[in-house]
Amino acid sequence: MKYLMCNLKSNKTLKEILEYKKDLQNLNKKNVEFILFPTSIFLSFFYDATYKIGSQNISTYQRGSITGEVLPSQLKSLKVDYVLINHAEAKETTEDVIAKIKNATKSQLKVVLCIGEEKRKTVEEIMVELHKKLKSILMKLTPRERDNLLIAYEPSWLINTKEIIDANILAMIVKVLKNELKKEYNLDLPILYGGGITPENIEKLTKVENLNGYLLGNSANKPENVLEIMKKI
């Protein structure tokens, strides 16, 4: 089974999100775990959705009366299943990322952990950076918290473009990541790719061995893109 995740970021007005939901009514989810990440103020509109819903953020606090925070209990009450953490645009500290993972896991929310390099690099340089980032997070997590992760590899220099990383390079990155996770942490986690995905280039990604899914950004804003990509994976 493949994952298809759609991050709507801060896009859509009230009218637009209702139209978007209507356009996805006939989504064919066969053999695909489809997860939509709308803006937090619109999460309640998807309470009755037939697909999974994710939040773009979660508080570092488990409970309390804190202005502007989105608590795990609130997300659970809206039937949210996934949480996006450490996206390049969120600018979160490592300490916040760890706290959010712990919070999500306590509340049985699956964590999509984003990692990726900020600029174009060689494969060797990319792996050094990813290894360092993952180690700084995984070493502070319990086995249960580690098992609760899905890894979304998303080079931030390709976000908001229509260009994807070379499929052969991606295949090497996925292979090395999976081997390292298994060898160092005894983990077998799903790995997704995000960054520049469009209906025109998705088929190149479907040929990448051991890649478990895709995280859409800009392309997700048009429901016709989502439906077309769904047909191709």
Image: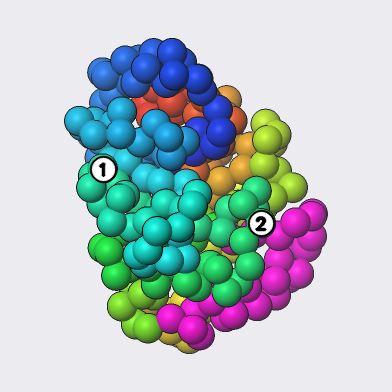
Q: In the image, residue 13 lies at what x, y percent?
A: 50, 20
Residue occupying the point 28% across, 56% down: 73
Question: Could you tell me which secondary element the residue under label 1 belongs to?
Answer: loop
Q: In the image, residue 219 lies at what x, y percent?
A: 55, 28
- Residue 123: within the magenta? yes
Tell me the kind of residue under disc 2: Lys
Q: Is residue 102 left or right of residue 154?
A: left
Disc nearer the start of the sequence (1/2): 1
**59 or 163: which is nearer to us?**
59
What segment carries the magenta color?
115-141
Q: In the image, residue 160 lies at what x, y percent?
A: 68, 35
**Quadrant of the rendered structure where residue 25 is?**
top left
Query: From this viewpoint, is residue 6 visible?
Result: no
Q: Is residue 155 left or right of residue 105?
A: right
Question: Could you tell me which secondary element the residue under label 2 belongs to?
Answer: loop
Residue picked out by circle 2: 91
Within 10 Å of disc 2 (Cα), the crowding (few <14, some 14-19, many 20+) is few
Q: Which mark is residue 44?
A: none
Q: Is residue 120 above or below residue 10?
A: below
Residue occupying the point 79% across, 54% down: 120
Labels 1 and 2 touching (C-beta < 8 A) = no
Residue picked out by circle 1: 78
**191 or 171: which is nearer to us?**
191
Q: Quadrant of the C terminus?
A: top left
- Distance between the alpha carbons at the discs numbered 1 and 2: 26 Å
Q: Is residue 44 left or right of residue 56?
A: left
Q: Nearer the viewer, mark 1 or mark 2?
A: 1
Tell me the kind of residue under disc 1: Leu
**18 or 131: which is nearer to us?**
18
